[in-house]
Amino acid sequence: MLQIARRRVKAHPMPNPHDPSLLAKAETLVDALPYLQRYAGRTFVVKYGGHAMGDPELAHDFAEDVVLLKAVGINPVVVHGGGPQIGAMLKKVGVESQFVDGLRVTDKATAEVAEMVLSGAINKEIVGWIAKAGGRAMGLSGKDGGLVTARKVQRTSKDPDSNIERVVDLGFVGEPDRIDTSVIESISAAGMIPVIAPIAPGPNGETYNVNADTMAGSIAAALGAARLFLLTDVHGVLDKQGELLTDLRPADIDRLQKDGTISGGMIPKLETCVHAVEAGCEAAVVLDGRVSHAMLLEIFTQEGAGTLIRAG
């Protein structure tokens, strides 16, 4: 006689509709609804780096965030850095780093190591994190599919004694010159998340290492992204009292730089944001990547979590 196994159904207590914790979860989803509607079908470009990249728990949170964005109809594009990892690998293989005015000179050997670390180890690790969080990602660099063509970065330095400016040769350090967004758009349309290493070819086939912030800003502008997120190791832009400045325009940034409120490494980050919003990105956000799910707090709450930069 054929015997049919019956599935044992485990009984659960009825949920209490008046449970405050359950109501809070429902209210969170309702509060997020206007933002979900606003950004459905839009693109977010996220620059991922800093200490958050080296923390497994934060890396897991980051992967969950981008998978969630994709699941609710937003198209995230990840651009990652890897400066500390490049430095560690250069030391391991015995390649000496040269610096000019605090900037690393990228010779041919350094460029090869940078490509190996960025396009190889780091890129595939991030793809793996996203897969573990339930998403589908494709790793690539600016070399793939003609995504980015770079030009050599030109820098000058003023001699403190003679006050004469001289050209500084940083070697194989580049910046985006042309971007073909069709590669990114095809990956996103296929239901996957592009994860981009900041390596790009020059017009003659040479390999350039590109600053990850610069790469992300240029890609956000080319895509007409709704948001560019720069995940950093600070809360955002702070005033002289240490309070977070939540909303800035280019004129505000210029004023704050002149009075010394903005200085150091924050200056190039904000220059990237201003370039992006003036070239087609709707808004840029400087955000603390060390805060769990900071990106979701910025996107789906009225208060936000970082410094928003808009044109105008």
Image (tube, rainbow, N blue to C red):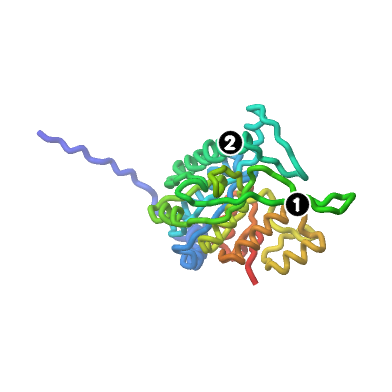
Mark 1 and mark 2 lie on one chain; the one further toward the N terminus is: 2
> Marks 1 and 2, how far apart in space?
25 Å
Tell how many labels: 2
Residue 203, percent from left and from top: 55, 49
| Quarter-of-image position of residue 115 | top right
Position of residue 176 measured from the top left corner of the image (x, y, whole percent):
58, 53
**Which disc, if any, is residue 55?**
none
The N terminus appears in which quarter of the rendering?
top left
Secondary structure at numbered mark 2: helix
Q: Nearer the viewer, residue 255 or 302?
A: 255
Residue, disc 2: 112
Q: Residue at (56%, 43%) from the top-left corner?
A: 206
Residue drawn at the location 58% of the way across and 36% of the way down: 112
Residue 273: quarter of image: bottom right
Residue at x-position 65% and y-position 63%: 274
Residue 208 appears at what percent x and percent y? 59, 44
Name the residue type under label 1. Answer: Thr
In the picture provided, is 245 more to the left or to the right than 117?
Answer: right
On residue 156, the disc is 1
Residue type, numbered disc 2: Glu
Which quadrant would the C terminus be assigned to in this image? bottom right
Residue extending furthest toward the left? 1
Q: In the image, is residue 93 above or below residue 165?
A: above
Left or right, 209 with reference to 164: left
Direction right: furthest residue = 161
Image check: 221 left or right of 9? Answer: right
